[in-house]
Image (cartoon, rainbow, N blue to C red):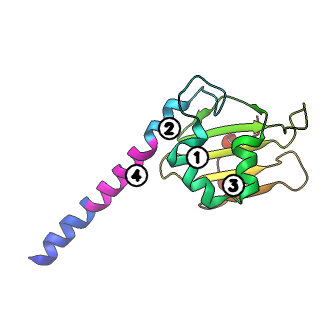
Amino acid sequence: MRNAKFIFILPLLGIWISVVAQSKYVNLRSWEGKYPTYNNERQKFFDLPEIQHPLRKLLNRRDYYLLTRGHTKEGPIKLIDDYLKVKVCGSPGSYICDNATILVIDLNDGSMYVAFDIFNREPRYYSSKGKFTDLPKEVQSPF
């Protein structure tokens, strides 16, 4: 009898954990079409706790600054399937779109993927789960 209860409760617990994890990131869909920092929102995208905390763990201090504050140009946030894609580029000393960077967030589990200097010979990749190159081609694309 005890085993039957355990077997019944275990799948319910798994479903509950999945629902809680998805609901944590579902609010990020509202950022589609908005800009990470240059917008009329009261809070900036990179300052959201569900963005800021994982990024600080994933990136070193310099790269975190470069992604969140060091770029001078940015595009609107795109929603592609269940991925949010943020593109930023530029640097304080340049008027061109150098140092192109992509941040991708999987809205299913919150995993993050960052590619720095994507147009250089040796781009730098960071990911909290798997590899950046494992993402769908449309999400990886710099355009």
Tag 2: residue type? Answer: Leu
Q: Are marks 3 and 1 in contact (CB under 8 Å)?
A: no
Mark 2, residue position: 28
Residue 48 spot, x, y in % from top left: 53, 42
Disc 1 element: strand
Tag 1: residue type? Answer: Ile
Q: Is residue 22 left or right of residue 11?
A: right
Mark 1, residue position: 105
Q: Which of pointers 4 and 3 lies earlier in the amino acid sequence?
A: 4
Determine the CA span between mark 4 and mark 3: 21 Å
Disc 3 element: helix
Determine the CA span between mark 1 and mark 2: 9 Å
What is the span of residues highlighted in magenta in the rendered image?
13-25
Compared to residue 119, the image places residue 2 above or below, namely below
Q: Is residue 78 magenta?
A: no
Determine the CA span between mark 3 and mark 1: 11 Å
- Image label count: 4
Determine the CA span between mark 2 and mark 4: 13 Å
Determine the CA span between mark 1 and mark 4: 14 Å
Compared to residue 22, the image places residue 94 above or below, namely above
Mark 3, residue position: 132
Q: Which of pointers 3 and 2 lies earlier in the amino acid sequence?
A: 2
Mark 4, residue position: 21
Residue 107 spot, x, y in % from top left: 50, 45
Task: Say which residue appears at 18% left-offset and 65% top-offset.
Answer: 8
Residue 139 image label = none
Q: Is residue 93 left or right of residue 125?
A: right
Give the class, few, some or many, for how many residues have Cα within 10 Å of label 4's Cα (few <14, many ≥20): some
